[in-house]
Image: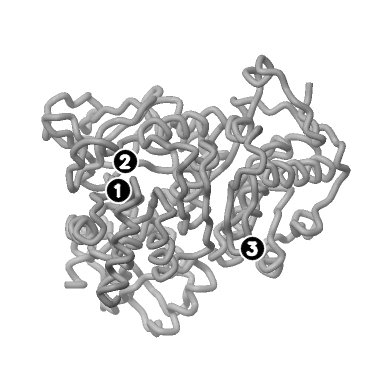
Amino acid sequence: MRYLCGGARLSKRRLLQHMISIIEKSKGRGSRIAITDNTGSYSYAQLLLEARRIAAAIVHRNGPFPGPVLFLVPSGFSYVATQWGIWLAGGIAIPVHTAHPAEEIAYLVQDTGARLFLYETSFAEKAQEACADPSVTIALTELDGPAAISLPEVRQTDDAMMIYTSGTTGKPKGVVISHLQLDTQLRSLSEAWAWHSSDRILNVLPMHHVHGVVNITCCALYNGAMLEMQPAFDPAYVAERMTSGELTLFMAVPTIYHKLIQHFQQLDARTQEAWQAGMRSMRLMVSGSAALPVTVLEQWRQISGHTLLERYGMTEIGMALSNPLNGIRKPGYVGTPLPYVAVRLTDEQNRIIEAPRSPGELQVKGDTVFRRYWNRPEETAKSFDGDWFRTGDIAERDEEGTYRILGRSSSDIIKSGGYKISALEIENALLEHPGVKECAVVALPSEEWGETIAAAITGDADTALLKDWLKERLAPYKIPRHFLHTDSLPRNAMGKLLKKEVKQLFQ
């Protein structure tokens, strides 16, 4: 039995054998609005129809189960339809950040070995520059195929998507997530945060990270809710939508809440009151992807009446910990384990820590956890202790079982504006510049960004020109905000950089 683009119905028994849960759950919602974006509003029926069209064209062009498929599409209806189309064709959907330069995208093409790269026409030049083989790239508007083509049987154990994340090696790694793991993540968040078909959420986050892709977009559509999608964050637009009283949820990174506070403070009293009334009618606001400063939490609570729900997760595990939907949310803490998730703390000898207030590495187990990095079996093996994924984050648990993240076990991961950024990747890029002899990239604390990127360099490179040079090689959020020229960098007797001392140079 196969899915048919003509809309053949499958028996309940067969759905249990092979299904893409989020797509199967959307059937029967018909004319109900699924997505609203800058181009209009689209029903669940329209979303399914367009996804099947794209799937048929992919199968016609590349055959069923085409492997990794990259797509460079801005946030909106076309993004979701493309993602679902790749899934229906049996492919692995790999979202490409619209802000990434061609050089970074070329790395994704090479690392995945993808034979298909779909793009929205406005990104044609960037997509074609990133792909040495022109036969790999095709615009969505040119993607076509016979409508009656059969689609493959996609099972929950098949790979669904690959999200790239930076590791301590400096090279981004592809985190492979199956349909089963995605479905478990969606069930976990749906239960914990009481998602309902009556919900309406605005998504202003980048669509190449799990926060925007899974926590917002997939959760909303999984539950039959209404999803508003914007390609970029604009505080005035967010304020307008919150004022409307139509939204029930909002999720963002701490940097966005900081910018919304700044915007609020610039408004006149009457406009502030209208915005506050709209916010009070919402049922939930969530902050994640970076540590939330307590000052931001308190300011937002005074403005909105909401205590932001902090949670903890990462690309490899989805969400693992969350403050309660109902109950006390502790500032500075990320809560307790979510449904279908097990966590533990271990010491440096990997012994389990039972005592409260004793720091250790946070490890996670469950069907929400990924199983492998793409083509990196050794790194995958090192990341697990049996079924337990080693997050690399240091945490502690209080007497009530609530967790608090203390920091990374690696000094080479920077969390800025909701992004996890490899300091080594930036250092490698800097060292390609002829005017940079040595460099060290570190994180500096920032209330607005969580952390900001700072680079200490030796050599004669001009800082202003160096920023422009880096823009051709790195995504905008990876460009250091602070530069420091120095005669030498602090090192130990073995020649290893002392990054704690590098941070002190910026003081």
Callout 1: SS = loop
- Up-down: is 2 above or below 121? above
Foreground tag (3 vs 2): 3
Q: Are marks 1 and 2 in contact (CB under 8 Å)?
A: yes
Residue at 57% over, 57% down: 75
Assign the N terminus to one quadrant of the image. top right
Q: Which numbered disc covers residue 392? A: 2
Residue 94 tag number: none
Quick one: label 3 or label 1, which is nearer the N terminus?
3
At label 1, the amino acid type is Ser
- Which residue was labeled with disc 1? 410
Query: Label 3: which residue?
Result: 39
- The image position of residue 255, as x and y in percent, is 33, 62
Q: Earlier in the sequence, mark 1 or mark 2?
A: 2
Identified at 54% across, 64% down, the residue is 100
How crowded pointer 1 is (Cα within 10 Å; few <14, some 14-19, many 20+) is rated as few
Residue 64 is left or right of residue 190, and the answer is: right
Mark 3 or mark 2, earlier in chain: 3
